[in-house]
Amino acid sequence: MLVIVSILGLVFAIGFLVLLKLHLPVGITMGLTGGLAVGVVVLQYCLGPMIIDHIVKVRWTSPEELGSGSDVWLSNACGTFKIAKPRIGIIEEAAPNAFTYGHGAYDARVVVTRGLIEVLSEDELRAVVAHELGHIRNGDFVVMTMVQALVLFLWTLYYTSRTSSRNNNWYIVLAAYVAYWASYYASLLLSRIREYMADYSSAQITGNPNHLSYALVKIAYGLAKTQTVGGATVPISGQVRPTTQAPPPANASPYSYDDATVAKQRAMLESARYDNAHAIAAGAIAPKGAAGTAATKPQPKKKEAFSAAQLGAFGVMGVSSMRAAVAWSGADGLANPDTFTTAARWELFNPWGKIGEVFSTHPLTALRIKALQKLNRLFNQPDAFDFSKIKPAKYNGFARDLLLVSSPWLGAVIGGAVAGSFFFSQKRFDLSQIFMPLAGFSAGRLFVLIFSYMGEFKPSKVIRLLGEVEVSHVNPIPTAIEGTFTGRISPGIAWASDFIVQDDTGFLACLYRTPLGIMKLWFGLTTADRYVGKRVRVYGWYRRFNAPYIEIHHFDVLDTGERVNSNYFVWAVIGNLVLLAGCVTAVVMLRGLPI
């Protein structure tokens, strides 16, 4: 509510200033700017679910396909939240993900991928579905639609002030522009807050926040085996075997990987069961329902009011992002807490993780798990992961990264300064002064390309890359990963062109970049799908910002010998060289300088 109120304040403050200085009739101005903003967002709200229905290849099915007893469990969960049962859909792709959409609680849809069903245990899958039900219960659809309308309204106010403002009203244009961007990033903050609220809803339904914690780790770092959809095979410990495997023994701990950890976790769980048994006997906690629903119902004397403070700091980056990386836990596919402590180091100690939060709709995985473990106190559950085992680290390349990121703009400033010196010295303006900042920007962009695409591609493994702290989006690790393309990143989208590569330690997003966007779209529509399920060797740059990924330079299809090139780097360099040469030539010719 504070975020929404803040955006409303910005909208009306800037709107008042613009109207005051433009001297336009209030009705006309508000009708043109506000009407367009609200109209576009309302149209998006009305048509959005239908567009998704037609674009995304979802197979609508019974909740029972999520596991035996899931229909009854879903009915009980929706009854607890006092919402209608949503439609359940499955996308037959390997990327583990889940999302919900609709106009409201009355026609909501919850969609999961086949990869998510295969990766998660029954409790973990229900925790993810409960998270999506939390979004429905909290009315996220309507709230975010309102926020989008306000943000767009601020943009129209900025645009109106820019095109109509007089010369002495430049500060209004600047204020409107700053207000627009402030509202945009405030809307992202609101999106991250709603993820924490949905996590809390999941804990309410399952009675155990650890279920969602393990699900998030499996999705974002993937401390579990991942199976390829459609009967393909994936490498396991250097072998290739069918994806369909026998489930672990019924008495095996779902969150362990060796005998020592099994014993330790069983002791913790048994202790928790003992405490819960006494709480049930005392009437403080209701036992699980017949369908397996963990409906925790504390009596008034035990009830604790929920506040955002219980969730800890607002986090960073998308944890359930489709572009998440996965680290394998072992041949049995069971979660490895020690591997989590390796994979989480980048999020906790690399400053780009905190910066990336500002640009993300989801919090960082590690911070969401910290928040969930705080909720364990409310539900008398042991913590799933020991953050004290995470070895501190320091990222030493931050200053270098800042220089690279700012180089194009520094070049533009230098070029602008040179142009300004000519203007003030000669007291006249000519076209060459326009090309000078552009030449500086292009030179800075070349500097970034050269230093962020350097190095020799060396063989590596997914888990090894995930444990690296000394990496960023402009400080990559040149790598070569051999594995299988288990699917495309965006499940159900026909033109998706980015892949997921899986080796015997985990899987990682692979982004296929092209010189022109239309080329990427064409590759996705006509070519990308035929490489799914193929054994490949991917050469590229491992980067990390919003999420870990490999930017593909090229990949080889091992069974056919075919090589597929991205060509982005080559054409980016050529394009900037041509632009720089053109700008320099224009300056020389316009100023009559000797060549």
Image (cartoon, rainbow, N blue to C red):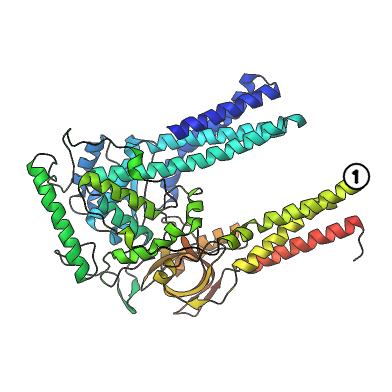
Examine the structure image and report whether residue 24 is included in the region drawn in magenta: no
Location of residue 530 by image quarter? bottom left
Residue at horizontal 50 percent and vertical 37 percent from the top: 148
- Residue 61 in view in this figure: no
Residue at horizontal 34 percent and vertical 70 percent from the top: 232
Picture coordinates of residue 68, whole percent (x, y): 18, 53
Location of residue 218 by image quarter? bottom left
Please state, as top left, top right, bottom left or bottom right, where the C terminus lies in the image: bottom right
Q: Is residue 364 above or below residue 524?
A: above
Q: Which structural element holds mark 1? A: loop
Q: Is residue 310 above or below residue 577?
A: above
Most foreground residue, 496 or 410: 410
- Crowding at label 1, few (<14), some or many (≥20) Cα neighbours within 10 Å? few
Picture coordinates of residue 180, whole percent (x, y): 58, 37
Q: How many marks?
A: 1
Q: In the rendered view, does 64 fall on the left or right side of 518?
A: left
Q: In the rendered view, does 581 fall on the left or right side of 310?
A: right
Most foreground residue, 580 or 141: 580
Q: Is residue 428 above or below residue 15?
A: below
Q: Amino acid at mark 1?
A: Lys
Q: In the rendered view, does 578 fall on the left or right side of 260?
A: right
Picture coordinates of residue 579, whole percent (x, y): 75, 60
Q: Circle 1 sits on which residue?
A: 427
- Residue 506 in view in this figure: yes
Picture coordinates of residue 117, whole percent (x, y): 29, 58
Location of residue 155 by image quarter? top right
Most foreground residue, 137 or 384: 384
Range drawn in magenta = 315-329
Q: In the rendered view, does 384 fall on the left or right side of 423?
A: left
The main secondary structure of the magenta stretch is loop
Residue at horizontal 42 percent and vertical 41 percent from the top: 49
Please state, as top left, top right, bottom left or bottom right, where the N terminus lies in the image: top left
